[in-house]
């Protein structure tokens, strides 16, 4: 079973998601932006979702988490919840 350590920022507006991604690219603190802007319950933890198992997240995010390079900001990715910026901090496979 594959697992990953993931954090994300969820917002309703594509433009805001794009602005936040640019701020992150310019060196802004991910946790601070998540606390200020994310509508997910994980906002209070700086966007930390913790360890997630394959199949645990919304399909579009799940596919991204288990295919994107580690330590890069991915997104904005649209789901039924809004627009996500996602960072896979670490990925591991359990045999």
Image (cartoon, grey):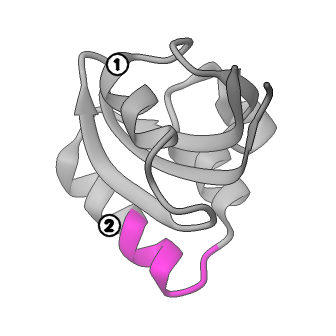
What residue range appears in magenta? 21-28
Who is closer to the viewer here, 94 or 52? Answer: 94
Report x, y in % for residue 64: 40, 41
- Relative vertical location of residue 66 with respect to residue 74 in this rendering, above or below: above
Kind of element beneath mark 2 = helix
User: In which quarter of the view is residue 32 placed?
Assistant: bottom right
Neighbours of disc 2 within 10 Å: few (<14), some (14-19), many (20+): few
Residue depicted at 60% across the width and 61% down the height: 70
Residue depicted at 51% across the width and 62% down the height: 69
Q: Label 2: which residue?
A: 19
- Relative vertical location of residue 57 with respect to residue 45 in this rendering, above or below: above
Residue depicted at 29% across the width and 51% down the height: 76
- First in sequence: mark 2 vs mark 1: 2
Report x, y in % for residue 4: 70, 37
Q: Which label sits on residue 59? A: 1
Q: Is residue 48 left or right of residue 14?
A: right
Q: Main secondary structure of the magenta part?
A: helix
Q: Is residue 77 left or right of residue 50?
A: left
Does the magenta portion include 25?
yes
- Discs 2, 1 touching: Cβ within 8 Å: no
Quadrant holding the C terminus: top right
User: In which quarter of the view is residue 61 placed?
Assistant: top left
């Amino acid at each position: 079973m594959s697992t990953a350590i993931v954090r994300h920022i969820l917002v309703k507006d594509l433009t805001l998601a794009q602005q936040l991604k640019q701020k992150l690219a310019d060196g802004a603190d991910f946790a601070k932006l998540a606390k200020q802007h994310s509508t997910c319950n994980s906002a209070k933890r700086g966007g930390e979702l913790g360890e997630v198992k394959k199949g645990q997240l919304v399909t579009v995010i799940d596919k991204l988490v288990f295919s994107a390079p580690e330590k890069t900001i991915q997104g904005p990715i649209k789901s039924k919840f809004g627009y996500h910026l996602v960072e896979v901090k670490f990925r591991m496979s359990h045999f």
